[in-house]
Amino acid sequence: MNGYQITFFTQQDRRHHGKPLADWIVDLAQELGLPGATMIAASEGYGHHGRLHSVHFFELADQPLEIQMMVSVEDAERLFERLKSEKVHLFYVKSSVEFGTLGEPD
């Protein structure tokens, strides 16, 4: 199948509707019936402001997070329409990909 790999970048302390933004995005993907989403925690990184974001032993609030998903063209349109209607300010990368499943289900 052809579609997109979408990766969103955020931090642990960012919130939307009182919920951590990364969790909200994963829940939104499930609500929209998207085939899957994966949240990945990073130890550090920096963004367009040049400010270093990192995880500390006692404080996880500034920890960088990525949310990745593979979606069809139609699913990507629905996802971005919803994000725009929610007025979510979020950096993303959207790349054209071919994806599928190999082998027999478990």
Image (spheres, rainbow, N blue to C red):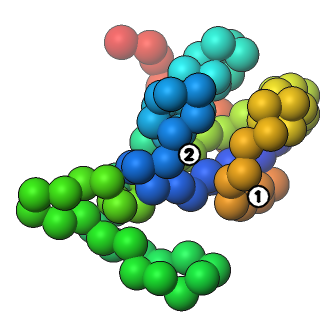
Q: Position of residue 62 (x, y in %)?
A: 35, 61
The image shows residue 104, relative to residue 50, as above or below, that is above
| Residue that numbered label 1 is attached to | 95
Residue 83 placement: quadrant: top right
Circle 2 Cα neighbour tier, 10 Å, few/some/many (<14 / 14–19 / ≥20):
many
| Residue that numbered label 2 is attached to | 68
Q: CA distance from mark 2 to mark 1?
A: 11 Å
Element type at mark 2: strand
Q: Position of residue 92 (x, y in %)?
A: 70, 57
Residue reaching furthest to the bottom: 50
Residue reaching furthest to the front: 18
Comparing 21 with 8, the one in front is 21
Q: Choose the circle earlier in sequence order: 2 or 1.
A: 2
Examine the rendering and report whether any part of residue 40 can be seen: no
Which mark, residue 5?
none
Image quarter (top left, top right, bottom left or bottom right) of the N terminus? top right
The image shows residue 20, relative to residue 56, as above or below, that is above
Q: Residue at x 53, y 55 (%)?
A: 10
Q: Position of residue 86 (x, y in %)?
A: 78, 31
How many numbered discs sit on the rendered protein?
A: 2
- Left or right side of 9 for 97: right
Mark 2 residue type: Gln
Image quarter (top left, top right, bottom left or bottom right) of the C terminus? top left
Comparing 13 with 54, the one in front is 13
Give the mark toward the camera: 2 or 1.
2
Mark 1 residue type: Ser
Element type at mark 1: strand
Comparing 87 with 35, the one in front is 87
Q: Residue at x 24, y 64 (%)?
A: 55
